Amino acid sequence: MAITLKNAHDIEMMRVACRLASEVLDFITPHVRAGVTTGELDRLCHEYMVKEQGTVPAPLNYQPPGYPPYPKATCISVNDVICHGIPGDKTLKNGDALNIDITVIKDGYFGDTSRMFIVGDGTILAKRLAQVTYECMWLGINQVRPGAHLGDIGQAIQTHAEAQGYSVVREYCGHGIGQVFHEDPQILHYGRQGTGLELQAGMIFTIEPMINAGKREIRTMPDQWTVKTRDRSLSAQWEHTVLVTETGHEVLTRSALTPPPPPGSSYVTSFAAST
């Protein structure tokens, strides 16, 4: 496993790219409402990235081996879609729960983040699942410090999700990120405390748990990208990009409208210094 530790220049560039990714979510928030299509949300995000930020949407035409090129600027996953939902003609309706996943490239560096949105009132289940998934992400983030292990992150997430009666998707994980979209290490959202790679200052990676209201099994659609829950239960996801510092961690994907962490969570934000 080849881990790229980031130097001071890399870290500053990542702060900028990650803040910009988060600001795309700030921008699109008021547009998420009943009657809008996911394709229109993607168009608005794409236009904002290119014209307002001068960033490049990393997902557009992204093509891992064995996959067709991804056709859109964002991933928008609605209700039982776990991840990689392709924006299109789907019209949002009251009660829909959706994840919008943004990755931008700025000056060669990738910033990656996602948030959950609920259209209108939402069901009790959707709101609870989104909240528990948010708590799972932050419980994972709170484990990040030099000397901790990747298994600590996974164990914290898995324990909380399963205690609430939910399941953790295992086929997809967080990842190292920098001048490459996906790099080592892989960040599993399940595991055992004290196992796995030891964290070092200078690592940057995403924590992005995908939590299902039902069982954890998945099914992939014929487009080869869209992944749904096999039992058609709701799924939720949140994502932050995190830096391992000398004394703990710094959440890089923060901006003016980023939801605050749950009570008891610790974080450092560079937002004030970067604006």
Image (spheres, grey):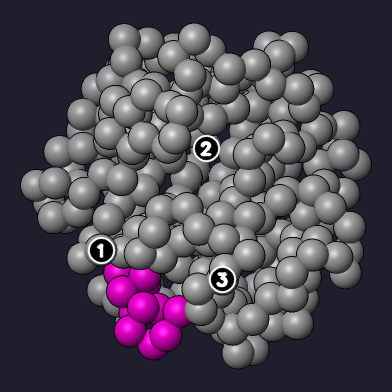
Residue receiving disc 3? 3
User: Which residue occupies the foreground of this view, 69 or 189?
Assistant: 69
Asked if the residues shown at circle 1 and circle 2 are in contact, with their CB atoms under 8 angstroms apart, the answer is no
Residue receiving disc 1? 108
Q: Tell me the quadrant of the picture where the C terminus can be found.
A: bottom left
Q: Residue at x 75, y 82 (%)?
A: 147
Q: Mark 1 or mark 3, which has the lower sequence index? A: 3
**Mark 1 belongs to which amino acid?**
Gly
Q: Which image quadrant is residue 152 in?
A: bottom right
Q: Horizontal placement of 127 versus 206: left or right?
A: right
The Cα atoms of the two marked residues, 3 and 2, are separated by 30 Å
The Cα atoms of the two marked residues, 1 and 3, are separated by 18 Å
Numbered disc 2: secondary structure? strand
**Mark 2 belongs to which amino acid?**
Met
The Cα atoms of the two marked residues, 1 and 2, are separated by 27 Å
- Residue 116 circle label: 2
What is the span of residues highlighted in magenta in the rendered image? 6-16
In magenta segment, residue 92: no
